[in-house]
Image: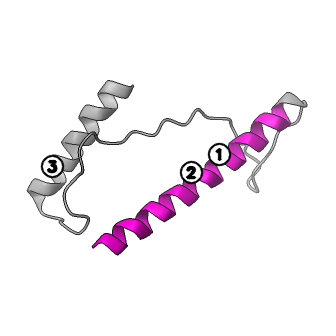
Amino acid sequence: MRSLDIALNEILVGDIEEFERINKLVKQARERGFTLTKDDGSTYKEYTLKIIEPDQPLDDTLDFSQPSIKRSMEAGWQKAQQVL
């Protein structure tokens, strides 16, 4: 289980780094009077990133039981209400 948690964390960290890299490029482009566009023609937008983490560890990563899912969701909702 621990190795799965580590792998998932590494994926999350990589995703956050990629988000921050693209967000920085969008900001730099805007500051210089440019707009970055996607392949479909829509524009990239700059966003403020807020990472919301529970105060306590959640249940086991592979525990998909209804009680575990409900506890994790409730912890997430409560923390999001505090942060947002």
Of 33 and 53, nearer the camera is 53
Mark 1 residue type? Glu
Q: Name which quarter of the figure residue 53 lies in.
A: top left
Q: Position of residue 8 (x, y in %)?
A: 42, 65
Q: Which residue is mark 2?
A: 16
Mark 2 residue type? Ile
In the rendered view, tell whether residue 82 sits above or below residue 50. above
Task: Assess whether mark 2 and mark 1 are in contact (beta carbons under 8 angstroms).
Answer: yes
Asked if residue 4 lies in the magenta stretch, the reply is yes
Secondary structure of the residue carrying numbered label 1: helix
Name the image quarter holding the N terminus: bottom left
- Mark earlier in primary sequence (3, 2): 2
> How far apart, in angstroms, are the residues tagged by discs 1 and 3?
31 Å
Secondary structure of the residue carrying numbered label 3: helix
Mark 3 residue type? Lys
In the rendered view, tell whether residue 19 sits above or below residue 32. below
Q: Residue furthest left?
A: 67
The residue carrying pointer 3 sits among few (fewer than 14), some (14 to 19) or many (20 or more) residues within 10 Å by Cα, namely few
On screen, residue 46 versus residue 78, left or right, reads right
Q: Which residue is mark 1?
A: 20
Q: Which residue is mark 3?
A: 70
Of 27 and 35, nearer the camera is 27
